[in-house]
């Protein structure tokens, strides 16, 4: 059996503000922006090069077996890049509030790049959902 992670719901308060942040500031591709039923809207966006998308939704009734998430309660989503310095510069130029580049060292989180797989930066969307960007040694297709 193959299980592929393809869509992660991101809880937000304002779909249009979040769509602008993810599409224009982060560079995600808008795959879908649709009212699927009266008052029910889904926006699906995909990070460049990713096989997994995020979904911003409003008005959909919660399924009784799925707990709801409050806006800003999703943390630890991780994106990978092959050049963290270039990605940092690009995100900063687009207005994304990224941290400095950091790595895990002997005393915990330390400034600057680390060894392979050990360079990171972090940012939050307008609602406070948090993201991590990690430098990978090669594109996903080559790993």
Image (cartoon, grey):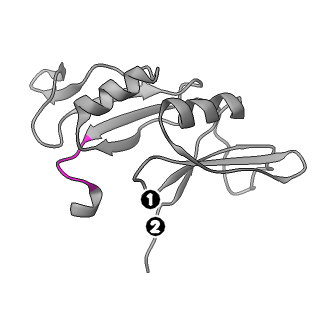
Q: Can residue 29 be spotted in the picture?
A: yes
Describe residue 12's horizontal placement relative to residue 48 as left or right.
right
Classify the position of the C terminus by image quarter.
bottom left
Where residue 48 sits: x, y (%)?
A: 43, 48
SS type, badge 2: loop
SS type, badge 1: loop
The rendered magenta stretch, by its main secondary structure, is classed as loop
Q: Is residue 136 highlighted in magenta?
A: yes
Task: Verify CB contact (< 8 Å) between mark 2 and mark 1.
Answer: yes
* Point 79% across, 49% down: residue: 60
93, 138: nearer the viewer: 93
Count every numbered label the image shows and give the total: 2
- The disc placed on residue 51 is 1
In front: label 2 or label 1: 1
Residue to which mark 2 is pinned: 4
For marks 2 and 1, give the CA distance: 9 Å
Describe residue 90's horizontal placement relative to residue 67 as left or right.
left
* Point 25% across, 34% down: residue: 84
Q: Is residue 27 highlighted in magenta?
A: no
Magenta-highlighted residues: 135-139
- Quarter of the image for residue 70 reads top right
* Point 61% across, 31% down: residue: 20
Where residue 104 sits: x, y (%)?
A: 17, 29
Where residue 135 sits: x, y (%)?
A: 23, 40
């Amino acid at each position: 059996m193959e299980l592929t992670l393809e869509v992660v719901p991101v809880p937000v308060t304002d779909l249009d503000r979040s769509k602008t942040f993810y599409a224009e500031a982060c560079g995600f591709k808008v795959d879908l922006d649709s009212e699927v039923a009266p008052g029910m809207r889904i926006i699906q966006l995909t990070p460049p090069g990713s096989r997994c998308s995020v979904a911003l939704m409003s008005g959909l009734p919660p399924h009784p077996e799925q707990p709801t998430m409050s806006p800003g309660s999703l943390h630890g989503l991780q994106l990978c890049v092959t050049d963290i310095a270039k990605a940092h510069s690009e995100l900063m130029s687009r207005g994304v509030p990224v941290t400095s580049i950091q790595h895990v060292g002997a005393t915990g989180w330390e400034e600057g790049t680390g060894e392979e797989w050990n360079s990171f930066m972090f940012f939050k969307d307008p609602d406070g959902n948090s993201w991590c960007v990690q430098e990978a040694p090669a594109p996903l297709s080559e790993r």
